[in-house]
Image (cartoon, rainbow, N blue to C red):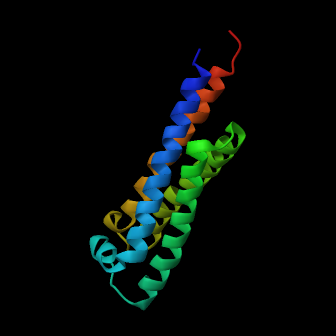
């Protein structure tokens, strides 16, 4: 049987890392949209500046929420934020695959957000599996 405190430590770690990653990606989108566009092989124009600024702000907001949830929130808040992260990760990774299948965009262009989302949806999924195992009676 998994130790509940070990599962909680794992979830806290995932939330903190996800939060820091979201904040870093958001800062990259807001402060260095040209470099991000070049890295993903996108054309740089005013629309990209607008989109990266808006999504960068959202990413930083989600990051702060996850960071605070991982550092000091009550367990039920942490698990709610984790459920949101799992839902968001699955949707974003699926969206990346759909965009690749339905548009001329390449894996290189959708990989940053898609792989980030996939990695954290798997990490949150593991947390919920471990939580379920630790709640089973012996």
In this image, 107 relative to 57: left or right? left
In the displayed structure, would residue 47 be above or below residue 56? Answer: below
Where is residue 115, by image quadrant? bottom left
In the displayed structure, would residue 20 be above or below residue 110? Answer: above
At 34% from the left and 63% from the top, the residue drawn is 107
At 42% from the left and 90% from the top, the residue drawn is 46
Q: Residue 133 at x, y = what percent?
A: 62, 22
Residue placed most toward the observer, 48 or 69: 69
In the displayed structure, would residue 92 be above or below residue 130? Answer: below
In this image, 11 relative to 21: left or right? right
Q: Residue 59 at x, y = what percent?
A: 52, 65
Residue placed most toward the observer, 65 or 89: 65
At 48% from the left and 84% from the top, the residue drawn is 50
Residue placed most toward the observer, 71 or 78: 71
| Quarter occupied by the N terminus | top right
In this image, 32 relative to 55: left or right? left
State how many labels appear.
0
In the orientation shown, which residue stands out farthest toward the front?
72
In this image, 120 relative to 104: left or right? right
Q: Residue 60 at x, y = what percent?
A: 51, 65
In the orientation shown, which residue stands out farthest toward the top?
138
At 32% from the left and 80% from the top, the residue drawn is 34
Q: Is residue 90 visible?
A: no
In the displayed structure, would residue 38 be above or below residue 21? Answer: below
Q: Is residue 29 visible?
A: yes
Q: Residue 77 at x, y = what percent?
A: 69, 45
| Quarter occupied by the C terminus | top right
């Amino acid at each position: 049987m998994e130790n509940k405190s070990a599962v909680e430590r794992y979830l806290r770690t995932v939330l903190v890392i996800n939060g820091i990653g979201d904040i870093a990606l958001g800062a990259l989108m807001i402060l260095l949209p040209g470099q991000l566009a070049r890295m993903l092989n996108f054309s740089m124009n005013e629309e990209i500046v607008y989109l990266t600024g808006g999504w960068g702000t959202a990413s930083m907001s989600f990051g702060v929420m996850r960071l605070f949830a991982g550092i000091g929130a009550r367990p039920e808040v942490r698990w709610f934020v984790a459920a949101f992260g799992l839902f968001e990760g699955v949707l974003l990774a699926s969206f990346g695959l759909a965009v690749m299948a339905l548009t001329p965009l390449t894996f290189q262009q959708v990989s940053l957000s898609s792989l980030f989302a996939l990695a954290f949806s798997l990490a949150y999924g593991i947390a919920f599996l471990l939580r379920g195992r630790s709640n089973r009676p012996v």
